[in-house]
Image (tube, helix red, strand yellow):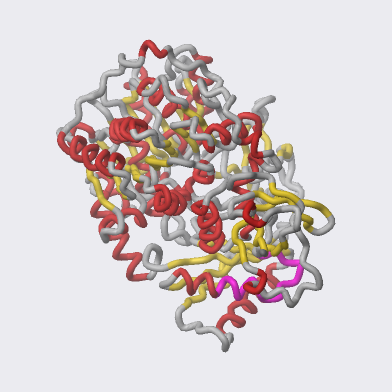
Amino acid sequence: MIAEIVFPVPLFRTFYYAIPPYIKEENVLCGLRARAPFGRRFAVGLIVALHKDDEVDLSGFAQIKEITSLLDKKPLFGDDFINLILWLAKKCNSPLGLIFSSFYTPVKNLKESEIMEQKTNISLGVSDEPAPDKTDENIEIEKELYPSQKAAIKKINSYIAGGLRKTALLYGPPKSGKTEIYARAIKTALKSNGQVLYLVPDIHLIYPVLEELRKRFPSETIDLWHSKITPKKRLESWKRIINRQAKIIIGTRSAVLLPFKSLSLIIMDEEQDDMYKQEEVEPHFHARDIIIKRAESHNSCVILGSSCPSIESFNSALSGDIELIELKPKFEDSLKPRIQIIDSKMYPAKIISDPLLEKIKERFEKREQVLLIINRKGYSYSVNCVKCGWKKYCVKCGIPMTVRKDLKTGEKIFFCWRCSKKDEILEECPKCFKKIFRQKGVGTQKLEDEMSGLFPNAKIIRFDGTTDVKKSISDKKEMPDIIIGTRIAARGHNFPKMSLVAVLNPEIDASPADFRSTEKLFQILLEASGRLSENISNREFIIQTNDPEYYVFPSFINSNYRGFVDEEIKMREKFSYPPFSFMARVVIFGNNSKEIEKKLEFIISSLENDTKHKTDNIELLGPLGVSKSKIRKVISGYLIVRAKKENDVLSAINRVRDLKIPKSFRLKIFMNPYNFR
């Protein structure tokens, strides 16, 4: 018998090993971990297939090595897990070993007895906070549902109780009660002794969800999973999940890789958020694709919840691939704030326009809260010399450095948001030696300084991912008067006295290179408006913009996301953008822009002149985005491979990988990319 094994290393292939005489063949099963010689060392891998000796072509091997031992008596990972890593490796066009490593790393090299032990602390999950007293279990009173909520939960509960595999898009305006439906669906899943995965797009949203679920389910084990938890807690949580001790798991996108054994319900809140797409490191997956795939093997119910669903999900619902469940609150109009657009060109050289400033003063005098959203961190976007145009670039990343305040000293510094490199602000230009610099744009820190000067007695906090809003609020001992933040502040937080929300210059994120940019703009406006408190009648939402005629704004003002979606779907179908096509972004990194462009043109010509494969089904766009800057240490350029069928894109990408690209260049491939900058 021959065992086919995948190792947690970034390789695309599997390896064949013979079974030694001292291991009985009947004990060798798919899903077992095996230790085997790998190069000059020994490594632990996973058996993904078993073959008879005559079923495998071993003619190219002088000698086939043998596995040395099995780490498990029973398969640690089932067929569903093996099928999932094989499927994901193909879909993401990522090394199979890297996919396996993503699932397996928390328990690498542990013995089966250490993983399957039952003596783990199951009372608190991975949270440091004390669990609520169980005597309060029946104090939480369920809210009364309005008709469309009742219909939604009745339908969802029937899927969960019946063990039916179903994906539903739960669509409703902000404050329409999606969280209440989630809670009741969780209750049904727990009754059937199933596990629940509750996904949120950002770490900052985990703790509000945790607090809510602890009130509703004080006696249940709730585990957390995100990038900030310690390795020890990560291991404990992983064990509880595989042992079915953890019933509710709240996590960010990486939680989709956990070893669930009885997954009944998957909730993906704010499903439209692009944080669910992993592009920083491989594998470049989207959490939505994985949960829908995992639901197939677990017969799980999937709820994709959103006030402004992604175009891909909405199109799937309209075409019948997934079910559309729409929430229509009884008093939907009462949820809508007054909306006003302010043309900031009428107030040059002012960060806050005069009309908006008056509204903020009015709210401050009434002791109501104000939220200001600007989707840029730091002090300013860039600094350049007035005389010669010199800009400061990061020597590591090659991107322009911004200006921010040092968190320790409070002094202004150059800062790179990609690698966190810091540099001092120069007194004179290193190119022309002039001493006049112009700072362009406004970030959250500069806006905070502006508001502190205008409202010296106000309690102001900044929430942009570099600060802990929960700690900031507790330090103030009272709820803040003014909150300043990026899009993070617009996601899922409840502010009890929020009567005014303003978004400053939202159009700056609308990039012609990104076909999703208008969709993202609508989403951030809707998310921000959802932070207004239901308890205040005179709620206002302000858009301060340099482009008041931008075509997204009328659809937002009229609360016509459905109409906006219909137009976007028509546009994407006309120009063959997803979901009507599949795309891959082929990126070349190097030190010379001309050479990069030549390499991209070489890839294009190689694909177009390939006589063995059809090229009629694919479209090649590029070279694109090749930087001409001589300052950057690393330069990149890319091309787009596009086709109606995913297999055609994958076939073209595999041919690209087979091309001989010199080692002086680095090749990266992003399947179904979200980033085009």
Q: Is residue 555 magenta?
A: no
Q: Nearest the camera: 14 or 309?
A: 14
Name the residue: 57% across, 88% down. 611
Front-most of residues 125 and 143: 125
Say which quarter of the image contains residue 573: bottom left
Specify whether 323 is left or right of 385. Answer: left
Camera-nearest residue between 15 and 659? 15
Q: Is residue 31 left or right of residue 143?
A: right
Q: Which residues are magenta?
A: 652-667
On screen, 254 above or below 125?
A: below
Q: Is residue 664 magenta?
A: yes
Residue appearing at x 23%, y 54% in the figure: 563
Of the 4 image quadrants, the one containing the N terminus is bottom right
Residue 589 visible (yes or no): no
The residue lying at 32 percent from left, 60 percent from top is 568
Instruction: Determine which quarter of the picture holds residue 414.
Output: top right
